Image: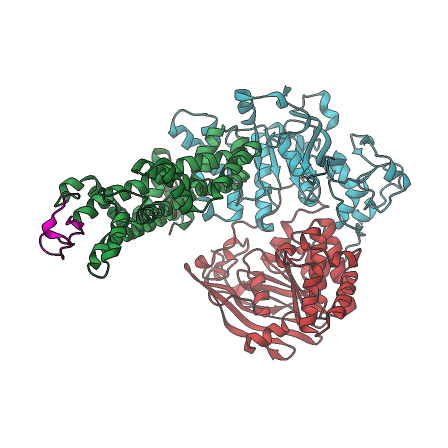
Amino acid sequence: MSAASNIRRNGRRPGMNDTMSKDPLLEVNHLKKLFPVKSGLLSREKKFIRAVDDVSFKLMPKETLGVVGESGCGKSTMGRSVLRLIQPTEGEILYKGKDFMKASGAELRKMRSDMQIIFQDPYASLNPRMTVGEVIAEPLNIQKTYSSKEETREHVLEAMKVVGINPKYYNRYPHEFSGGQRQRIGIARSIVLHPSLIVCDEPVSALDVSIQSQVLNLLRDLQESMGMAYIFISHNLSVIRHISDRVMVMYLGHVVEMADKDELFKDPLHPYTQALMSAIPLPERHSKRKKIILQGDLPSPVNQPSGCIFHTRCFMAQDICSKEKPELRDMGNGHMCACHFCGKMEKGICGEKLQG
Amino acid sequence: MSKNIFRFFNKQKEFEQDILKNGMGYSGFYGDSFKRLKKNRMAMFCAMLLILIILVAVFAPVLAPYDPTYQDYSAVLASPGPAHPFGTDEYGRDILSRIIYGSRVSISIGIVAQVVASLVGVTLGAVAGYYGGKTDSIISRIMEIFQAFPDLIFAMAIMTFMGKGVLNLFIALGLLTWVRTARMIRGSVMQLKEKEYIEASRANGATTFWIITKGLIPNCLSTIIVLVTLGIPNAIMYEASLSFLGIGIQPPTPSWGNMISAAQTFISYRPLYSIMPGVAIMITVIAFNIFGDGLRDALDPKLKS
Amino acid sequence: MGEKILEVKHLKTYFHTDAGLSKAVNDVSFSVEKKKTLGIVGESGCGKSITSLSIMGLVEIPPGQIAGGEIIFEGEDLLKKSEKEMSEIRGKKIAMIFQEPMTSLNPVFTVGQQITEALMLHEKLTKSEARKKGIEMLKKVKIPLAEKRFDEYPHQLSGGMRQRVMIAMALCCNPDLLICDEPTTALDVTIQAQILELINELKEETGTSVMMITHDLGVIAEVADDVMVMYAGKVVEYATGDQIFEKPMHPYTHGLMSCIPKLDGDDTKRLSVIEGMVPSFDEMPKGCAFCPRCPEAKDICRQKMPKLAEAEGRYVRCFKYTQEWEETGNE
């Protein structure tokens, strides 16, 4: 039995507190990604979109970190920066103790074979000119895992079976498959090299609900049998709750709250997390939970609000919020929250209503 | 029921064996494309026709009944007959032989000018699109300079500057068309390199060479094919226009273009003199176009029926 | 039952494709009552969007074909109307909101120009009247700084704002029926909550009937009075919202509800799934379209298509609730 299933069965999850017992698989410190914005010809001032602003976290082996936030919160950029598919502006990425930011050449290629990504759009993520067999074999060929074609084919075949694609479709092209099957092909491609980390970037958002649950189960089964860690990026809180061990909530490039899943869903501390949770439409009638409807839209990422980035939409903003930036503080049990009032506010101001 | 299941498993086993042995008969992207191309009868017919035209050009000395520059003053502007199937021109040269020899010039101009233009255009376009930034700016500015002149005037300027001749004509036509190719390829590459499947290859540690050969080229190939197959007839036409204007291929060397040009004086008296080279151009152009369309379709697995 | 504003009877919309005849909407009947919201739910390809396009007369013919049925709107059959009459009904009496607000707004005209165009066309208002009404509408859909937004282009607005503009445009001629096709699917949850609240408020205020088409049962639960579940071009369940969410009767409805991860409840278990996928139109099973994926399917389900029959005061297309169920074996 794998360690992952042990952890689940005991109801214990590797979190921030477990760092004593094991070394983290991935350690990200003060990661920043700024995109320069084209300003007018005459303007001297250089402007930046602060897509990821000072994000730090640790990921234990076999752990799933859920990253949740709305579009434009920088969660996808964060996921890609960690893999250096987008070169981060600043920050430190330690992977299995090695400095990933400084890796290059053969070392970088070797490290990359251990870190994979699954994309949101199963239509755009498969090369339309490659057959399923070629798509899945590509990582093996790039890494030159096998010298013979037979071995490569055998491995591909095994991967197809694991993700539930019938081997008879080996020679079909991606456009001949439905969305759910394409996502399975994408998953097969990401697991053939037996990576220790997979960044899942909204892997189920483009799928129908009945297919979504199949893919979620598949991802979970694969984690139990192969023991990789996931960074699971999604805008859907209920999906995040289902799959994650720990959850990070992002808003405008910042981490506003991070905690063990159970802790976070039982007692969300940040007003944004609370609003996000209350806004999900659930398939139940006459729900007693009270909705917090946030006013307005996400502010422009170029001109970020002063002080707390959330204060323009926050339902409990005070004077201090527009002046001082709240730090991400540990509120106990590794429950991190960036709000001036978390802890001070009436406990579970909406937690109770949410559970209703 | 159980027998059914058994058969099902046997069938699955067969698939697996097949895959392990030869990848289920899959012959790679290009092999697979060729299989699809073979099914397109029209395209295959045009391919045959093109091969035939090329063979005619190669074996012109064997096939042509007369020397194309031999002037027979006893048979000036002779009407078609057993000795001269398409008649003779104003110097008594056999038109059939001149068309056969003319194919050498026209076909080689079409193909060489296009191949040169495509090599330059695809390379520069791909470099500009893939690297972007300053590289892109420089290449784009160069392309804009080339595009600033009207095509024909540009070609005429080069020809007058460098002097008349076949080689100079190749260069002029190549310079004329590479910009268009480069622009299209630059656009496609810029679009393609943002695709997630390219990102997936990069995430697997693929080298730039791998990304270009496995990701970009197969997906750009349709565009390149269309450009080339449209470009070859275009070059043939340009040659005809330039020859018509008197700055293309110089007599007595025959080309389809300068034949039409010379024939215009006699169009009402000996219509076949101008029609036959025109027909030769038309057949070649149509064959290239249809074959190009077929090739493009074959390269796109989505169009597999 | 209240007064019916729209009654669709045995609607059949087919598409002629290279692979054969696709029965996208296959004998669908339903009605929308005055001031009520009908929710139509189903996965992609179930025919829910084609149903709404058929009502609007926006199905492209060919390859499409309305093969039969009636669409009675305020006592008249829309299928018998000419294109000219339909274009007067569209926008004025029946309005529609689409999923992607960016593509349904013309990028080269300002928001104001697009709203006033409809007002001047249908309501015969003068330009200044139309402007006044347009700004009023933008205020009604709670767009801040409506006067300023009125003269902006769609790309200057956020996704949520664009959807508000679409709603304002749809409602500016006081339509009797508003069709919303996945209005919040492209939006973030916090914005989705705003838009759903807005649609509910405006419905109360203007008394418009609403047809809400979505794949999201959560959205249905929040807005719909009646719910119709579609699968592979057919209605499989048709009941009030309370009935559906209290006790989904069709195995498909039940499966859909249980495969959504919940915010409460046990999250350590695997999600329950509906195995397989929606059959494509050229490999439709002989019997019930859902039977290859149905955990409860019996022989009879594989042999013939069940009828949409009344059971427990609602409609469901499943043999489970018929006499035949007990009589048939399961081999």
What is the x, y in percent for residue A42?
A: 71, 38
Q: State which quarter of the image contains the N terminus of chain A.
A: top right
- Our reading of the magenta stretch's main secondary structure is loop
Q: Residue furthest bottom?
A: C75
Per the rendering, the colour in which chain A appears is cyan
Q: The chain shown in red is which?
A: C
Task: Give the residue drawn at x 57%, y 75%.
Answer: C84
What is the x, y in percent for residue C87?
A: 60, 72
Left or right? Give the position of A139 relative to A221.
Answer: left
Per the rendering, the colour in which chain B appears is green
**Vertical comparison of B103 with B167: above or below:** below
- Counting the numbered discs, the total is 0
In magenta segment, residue B78 = yes
Magenta residues, as a range? B69-95
The image quarter containing residue C219 is bottom right
Task: Give the residue drawn at x 61%, y 76%.
Answer: C72
Task: Give the residue drawn at x 79%, y 48%.
Answer: A354
In front here: C242 or C153? C153
